[in-house]
Amino acid sequence: MCTMICERTEVEGSGKGRDGWFPLEMVNVSYDHPFNAPWEYGVNIDFVNQSRGVGSRVAVELSPQSAKKLADTIIEALKRGEANPQIKVSVL
Amino acid sequence: MYTTEQFEGIIAETITINGTNGDAIHTYFARPMGAGPFPAVVLAHHLPGWDELYREFTRKLAHHGYLAISSDLYCREAHGTPEDVAAAVRAEGGVSDDQVMGDLEAAAKYVLSLPSSNGKVGTFGTCSGGRHVFLAGCRLDCFDAIVECWGGNVIMSDEQLTDKQPVSPNSYTQDLNAPLLGIFGDLDQSPTPEQVNQHEAELKAAGKDIEFHRYPEAGHGFFYFDRPIYHQSSAVDGWDKMLTFLSRTLS
């Protein structure tokens, strides 16, 4: 769109798209015009697996303030989870 | 002037033309029925993609008597819903300016080759498409009229330049070779009113044939009736200004 601001990183996990669950490969976070949310600009988060086609996408469009709250909330949940010695994250 | 007794008919369909590097790209082509001669308009779609809105814009221009043609500027990248394709293109930083210029030129040459053409062709785009049509007016010599609607990133800082967008479009201002109609909302954040002021001042300083209209109650994308940013009175007047401009420059 107009800003072309987009940050990307590889991720591991699963996302639920229009055809059900699929393995995630990447998350794209842009600060640009949303497709559906009512603002001129928003934080658009796309969890994707490009190797499965552009339709393998879980999309979220947030206001900037909501995006900051989400980021803080993720960090807070991580802090609590990682501080608990009884919780081990298993990787297959 | 539209009157109720006049004959009206258009044909609208997807065709394929050869764009940059001879690549086959899907193209929506809407045209009035009849032998013509008709003027033409090449549409450059916005970053949300080759969507239903742009098909409607294309048909609207055909309804007003233009050979109207809109290529899928993301055709090489992927196919899917316009939103999914546009999201993928957004993640890759858009498509290259060089590729878009070649695709717009190919569409212009296609319509000019038709026996129903009157030999005149303009170009119209909004958002990233507004940026692209300004670039086309400067870098290509095939257009007789440019309609730039709220082109974002016409003025780019050095930090914004990329391999795909290596030059700030306003650097080409001196090369603009067709009359330009600019339509902008004063509440827009990209371009900001200050950037529109600079753009207009640079065009005037270069002695270009321009006509700018600014709408104080409109923001970005105020023609988009499928979005909350639609602004009715500004959109109606903007379309009227655009059709008047095209009639003057392409007849």
Image (spheres, helix red, strand yellow):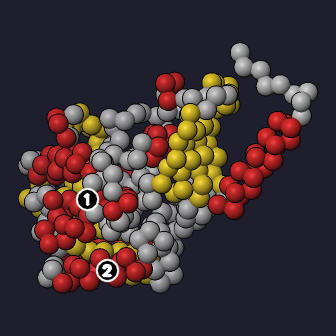
- Looking at the image, tell me whether mark 1 or mark 2 is earlier in sequence order: 1
Q: CA distance from mark 1 to mark 2?
A: 17 Å
Look at 42% across and 42% down and name the residue there: B92
* Residue A18 seen by the camera: no
The residue carrying pointer 2 sits among few (fewer than 14), some (14 to 19) or many (20 or more) residues within 10 Å by Cα, namely some
Q: Tell me the kind of residue under disc 1.
A: Val
Residue tagged by mark 1?
Answer: B167
**Which chain's residue wears label 2?**
B
> Residue B63: horizontal and vertical position, in percent?
31, 60
Relative horizontal placement of residue B63, taking residue B179 as reference (left or right): right
> Residue B172: horizontal and vertical position, in percent?
19, 66
> Residue B215: horizontal and vertical position, in percent?
43, 81
Residue B117: quadrant of the picture: bottom left
Residue contact between numbered discs 1 and 2, judged by CB atoms under 8 Å: no
Relative horizontal placement of residue B237, taking residue A87 as reference (left or right): left
* Residue B42 seen by the camera: yes
Relative horizontal placement of residue B78, taking residue A30 as reference (left or right): left
Look at 57% across and 29% down and name the residue there: A25
Q: Taking B94 as reference, is B178 above or below it?
A: below
**Which chain's residue wears label 1?**
B
For the C terminus of chain B, give its image quadrant: bottom left
For the N terminus of chain B, give its image quadrant: bottom left
Identify the disc placed on residue B198. 2
> Residue B116: horizontal and vertical position, in percent?
12, 52
Nearer the camera: disc 1 or disc 2: 1
Residue at the top extreme, as displayed: A92
SS under mark 2:
helix
SS under mark 1:
loop
Camera-side residue of A76 and B21 = A76
Relative horizontal placement of residue A57, taking residue B200 as reference (left or right): right
